[in-house]
Amino acid sequence: MIYRLTDERIVTLLSLLRQVAETNLAEVERLVGRLFAEDDANGALEAVSRDELLAGLSSGKVALLDVRPEEEFEAGHLPEAINIPLAQLENMLDKLPRDREIVAYCRGPYCVLSHEAVQRLRQLGYRVRRFQEGYPEWKAAGLPVAS
């Protein structure tokens, strides 16, 4: 089931709450460290910032990979993104360019889908990192979206 927010300011509120938790609760850092410990060891937590992503897209050096389910992608996504749901990743590798770095994204900074995609694609020899944010934060920042 897909829910839609009726007020886009909710994404901003959730982002602020996450920032407060990250700043004030050591437990959040410990939980994130445990959740993504393998990613950190492999460098996958080295995320692409919004500015870095915009620069990479404008120069044509980056390809975007949206690993959310197809229904979410159809509801809205970053422009020029390729949608390959995580469960279908290995069956659809032919859609991914080998000549550019791939930046994977999903629902936000703690969404495990993009972390898992980065791990799998790195094992297969792709140059890939994850976007430090996700679709909700991109849209809330007033950046262009497609549907």
Image (cartoon, rainbow, N blue to C red):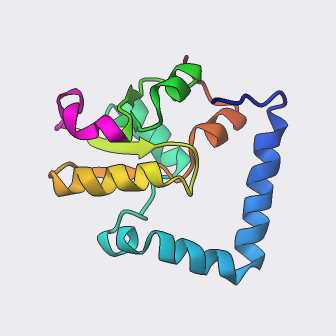
**Horizontal side of residue 13 vs 36, given as left or right:** right
Q: Is residue 147 above or below residue 13?
A: above
The percent position of residue 79, horizontal first and vertical second, equals 49, 24
Give the main secondary structure of the magenta stretch. Answer: helix
Considering every residue shown, the one lying at the far front of the view is: 1
Residue 89 makes an appearance in the image: yes
Q: Quadrant of residue 44?
A: bottom left
Q: Residue at x 58, y 49 (%)?
A: 108
The percent position of residue 68, horizontal first and vertical second, equals 47, 36
Viewer-proximal residue, 137 or 110? 110
Q: Residue at x 80, y 59 (%)?
A: 17
Q: Quadrant of residue 110?
A: bottom right
**Horizontal side of residue 6 vs 52, given as left or right:** right
Considering every residue shown, the one lying at the far top of the view is: 147
Viewer-proximal residue, 72 or 79? 72
Viewer-proximal residue, 128 or 99? 128
- The magenta segment is 87-99
Q: Tell whether position 96 is magenta.
A: yes
Q: Is residue 29 above or below residue 136?
A: below
The percent position of residue 5, horizontal first and vertical second, equals 77, 31
Q: Residue at x 40, y 44 (%)?
A: 104
State which quarter of the image contains the N terminus: top right
Q: Is residue 109 above or below residue 74?
A: below
State which quarter of the image contains the C terminus: top right
The percent position of residue 65, horizontal first and vertical second, equals 38, 36
**Horizontal side of residue 110 vs 142, given as left or right:** left
Residue 77 makes an appearance in the image: no
